[in-house]
Image (spheres, rainbow, N blue to C red):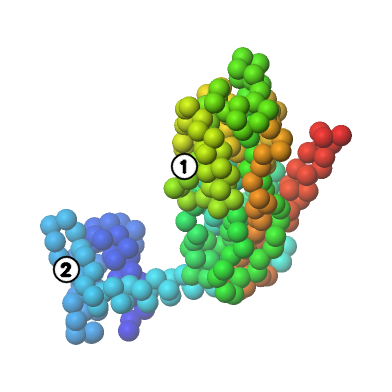
Amino acid sequence: MDWDKLRIFHAVADAGSLTHAGDTLHLSQSAVSRQIRALEESLNTTLFHRHARGLILTEQGELLFDATRSMSKRLDTAAARIRDSEDEVFGELRVTTTTGFGSLWLAPRLWKLYEEYPDLNIDLMLEERVLDLPMREADVAIRMKEPSQADLVRKKIMSVRMRLYADADYLEKHGSPEKLEDLVDHRLICQNVNSVQVSAGSTLVQEILSYEPPSTLRVNNYYGVLKATQAGLGIGVLPDYVISDFPKLIRVMPDVESNEVPVFLAYPEELRHSKRIAVFRDFVVSEIMEHRKRLKEEQE
């Protein structure tokens, strides 16, 4: 099959429109249409159903799109490895992690990495869904559990526990609970137990809810829990990595916490020698060491 026609097919399938694909490829709609017709004739099959709303892949088109998508990701990997210089760090690095960790801990620290490597372009993808690293949905992942995918380099970088926190002004006004039974006088702010999250966090919230606090605010990510807790709406269940960055948050009921949650950094085996991943990995590990050191000093 003609590589150029496959490239055009992939762009059309991805965009769902001849016009949009043409804009991406800098080709006219008629030129794109001719290439698709030629590919269909060479394969003796129909790859798209034509509708007023756009193009929909046929079953045969889906099979070919799966192949071109895999080819595209492998070409991206090859290009990334070629671009990695022994002395320079530049280009795109796609990082995926959870909404909470990415927005509350990682993003506020990235200025230090950019300061050292100003030509680095980071695409930070914050979501609870676990992206497929071997299929190059991302280059590197930071996850709250050990990755189960094969062919990954993985490193445990820290541990997290979910704990109870409240704003200092809130505690001054409403008092500090000393045991879980005291939550009858407070509002609990937490992730919804049905939201995608680590099981340790869900287990802790379920235990706290069994004490039937009279009012709750349930949010589907820790960023929302943090902002509501800072606003003095109640007592929030939050990961312990937030505490050093938000000194007005006070831990309540120090004996109440989740089980330990391991945090792993992982990337595909084929990117083991990537300079961009190496500097990102070393940056994250260095920041975690600094984070631990600051917490230890604050506790002494």
Q: Which residue is mark 2?
A: 49
The residue sitting at 43% across, 74% down in the picture is: 70
Q: Position of residue 144 (x, y in %)?
A: 60, 55
Q: Residue furthest top?
A: 173
Q: Of the residues shown, which amino acid type is indicated by label 1?
A: Asn
Q: How many marks are shown on the rendered structure?
A: 2
For this view, does 220 lie left or right of residue 271?
Answer: left
Mark 2 or 1: the one toward you: 1
The residue sitting at 82% across, 42% down in the picture is: 293
The residue sitting at 49% across, 65% down in the picture is: 132
In the image, 23 versus 193, the foreground residue is: 193
Q: Residues within 10 Å of mark 2 (few under 14, many from 20)?
A: few
Q: Of the residues shown, which amino acid type is indicated by label 2?
A: His
Q: Quadrant of the C terminus?
A: top right
Using the rendered view, name the quadrant where residue 227 is placed: top right
Q: Quadrant of the N terminus?
A: bottom left
Q: Which residue is mark 1?
A: 192
Q: CA distance from mark 2 to mark 1?
A: 41 Å
The image's mark for residue 67 is: none
